[in-house]
Amino acid sequence: MDSISLVGLPLVTFLDVEASGLDQPASYPIEVGWADTLGNSDSFLIRPSHAWTHWDDQAKALHGISRGQLLEEGLSVIEAAQRLNDMLGVETVYCDAVDFDGFWLGKLFKVAGIEPTFRLADMNEFYAVLDTDKAAYLKHILRRRSVPHRALGDAARYANACCEVFG
């Protein structure tokens, strides 16, 4: 990846996944949200596949999403995977927990039978292309902002902080 230009605001997209719990391999994705530095964003709940039964009440206490909500409002795994591919195209998308988010997205796409078109990357990869001052300032801003524990809120937290750095 080339160094990010400091002239103008670069397009950078951030993604977050909320899950049924942190226990791998039993947990599964329940919400995906993404936001970019140009003000675009999307989020949706995911209706669990029939094989996905794990539910952690401690995770629910963090994100506040009920299993009933997923069954009523969630997209099917196929609709969710297609929507992500349609919206994110071939972008590199950054997240702050690539091991977890990558696991859950991998599970989503595998069950959907669809290959992701975008590439998921760790925030450290993004920090590496920034100059030292910008990376430090971005980390400082993020430490000051609370983590909402909802997918869109978490992704927007990064996008908004990035806009502040480059604004």
Image (cartoon, rainbow, N blue to C red):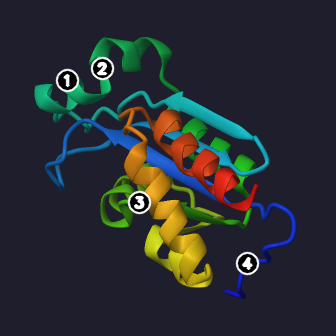
Circle on res. 61:
1
Q: Dot 2 surroundings within 10 Å: few (below 14), some, or many (20 or more)? A: few
What residue do we see at 72% from left, 61% from top? Answer: 166
Question: Pointer 4: what residue?
Answer: 4
Question: Pointer 3: what residue?
Answer: 96
Of pointers 3 and 2, the one earlier in the residue sequence:
2
Confirm or deny contact between disc 1 and disc 4 (CB under 8 A): no
Circle on res. 64:
2
- Near-viewer residue (134 or 82): 134
Q: Dot 1 surroundings within 10 Å: few (below 14), some, or many (20 or more)? A: few
Evaluate whether residue 148 shows in this view.
yes
What amino acid type is highlighted by mark number 1? Ala
- Near-viewer residue (126 or 61): 126
Q: Nearer the viewer, mark 2 or mark 4?
A: 4
What amino acid type is highlighted by mark number 4? Ile
Element under label 1? Answer: helix
Q: Dot 3 surroundings within 10 Å: few (below 14), some, or many (20 or more)? A: some
